[in-house]
Image (cartoon, rainbow, N blue to C red):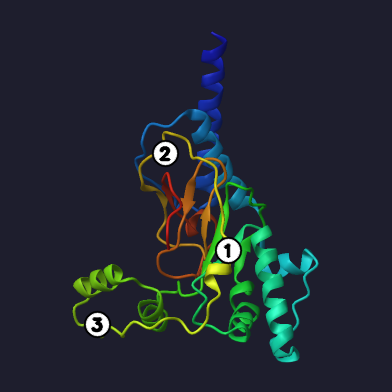
């Protein structure tokens, strides 16, 4: 009897969390089918959605400054100072569970300038990511023609390039070149704990058509918010910016 009451209470809490998420999304929340999942996992997921939506907005620039990292303008630094500052930023971001990807096409100065002037100033929710969570910043993840060209030139393997040409046969594929710099293999990498057994397949769960400026793995439940095309929120916020999936492995942008 007690277990039944406890289960009933959890169902009520889940429905209230869903209602709150719908309210925060401004009516733009769309829910798809998922595999059977333990109610405690589902409740944890909806708690995270609501906590995310209710959190204030900030930027990684502000978070770094709040963590004691000074961020001088690139033009005020020598080349040696730029390199030192860049790695200070990279390592502090990793401590915040924010990880850079696909940077070997940029020099240290170019990368620091890009981060300082653009990437770190994108809005993000002011939430604390734990060791089962991560925020990914692919430097060539905008979906622009230039980013696509550079990714195919420097980072895509032959299978990716072949698949791209099958999908876009008129695309002028650049010859592959090794990137001019050798940084990515030294970048901090995230590790994750095992996901719940029920989350063994990948499918759309929650979506409203726009995506956040990063790829994030939600704590504990292994729900993923992923970005396949644009790294910037053009309008709206909250659940209206989510594409969430269930998966047993971190998803690649």
| Residues at marks 1 and 3, CA–CA distance in whole angstroms | 31 Å
Label 3: which residue?
171
Quadrant in the picture for the C terminus: bottom left
Q: Which numbered disc, 2 or 3, marks the residue that appears first in the sequence?
A: 3
Q: Position of residue 71 (x, y in %)?
A: 74, 77
| Local crowd size for mark 1, using a 10 Å CA cut-off: few (<14), some (14–19), many (≥20) | many
Q: Residue at x 59, y 85 (%)?
A: 110
For the residues carrying marks 1 and 3, which lies nearer the camera in this image? 1
135 lies above or below 191? below
On screen, residue 104 versus residue 169, left or right, reads right
Q: Nearer the viewer, residue 184 or 63?
A: 184
Q: Work out which residue is located at the far right of the displayed protein and give it.
A: 68
Q: Is residue 55 left or right of residue 12?
A: right
Q: CA distance from mark 2 to mark 3?
A: 37 Å
Measured from the top left, where is residue 19 in percent x and y? Answer: 51, 40
Quick check: can you spot residue 144? no
Camera-near label (2 vs 1) is 1
Q: Residue at x 50, y 27 (%)?
A: 11
Q: Which residue is mark 1?
A: 99
User: Under tag 3, what secondary structure?
Assistant: loop
Q: Is residue 79 above or below residue 242?
A: below
Q: Please tell me whether mark 2 sits on a helix, a strand or a loop.
A: loop
Where is 91 relative to 17, above or below? below
Residue sitting farthest toward the top = 1
- Residue to which mark 2 is pinned: 199
């Amino acid at each position: 009897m007690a277990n039944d009451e406890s289960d009933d209470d959890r169902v009520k809490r889940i429905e209230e969390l869903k209602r709150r998420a719908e309210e925060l999304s401004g009516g733009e929340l769309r829910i798809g089918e998922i595999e059977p999942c333990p109610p405690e996992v589902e409740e944890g997921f909806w708690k995270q959605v609501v906590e995310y939506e209710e959190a204030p907005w900030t930027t990684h620039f502000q978070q770094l400054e709040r963590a004691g990292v000074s961020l001088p303008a690139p033009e005020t630094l020598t080349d040696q100072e730029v390199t030192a500052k860049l790695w200070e930023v990279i390592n502090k971001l990793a401590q915040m569970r924010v990880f850079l990807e696909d940077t070997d096409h940029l020099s240290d100065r170019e990368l620091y300038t890009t981060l300082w002037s653009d990437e770190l100033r994108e809005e993000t929710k002011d939430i604390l990511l734990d060791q089962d969570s991560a925020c990914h910043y692919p430097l060539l993840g905008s979906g622009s023609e230039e980013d696509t060209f550079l990714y195919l030139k420097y980072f895509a393997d032959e299978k990716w390039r072949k698949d791209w040409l099958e999908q876009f046969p008129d695309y002028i594929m650049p010859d592959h070149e090794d990137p001019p710099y050798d940084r990515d293999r030294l970048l901090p990498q995230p590790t994750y704990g095992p996901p719940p057994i029920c989350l063994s397949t990948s499918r759309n769960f929650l979506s409203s058509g726009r995506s956040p400026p990063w790829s994030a793995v939600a704590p504990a439940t292994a729900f993923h918010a992923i970005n396949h095309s644009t790294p910037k929120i053009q309008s709206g916020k909250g659940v209206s910016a989510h594409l969430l999936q269930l998966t047993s492995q971190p998803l690649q942008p």
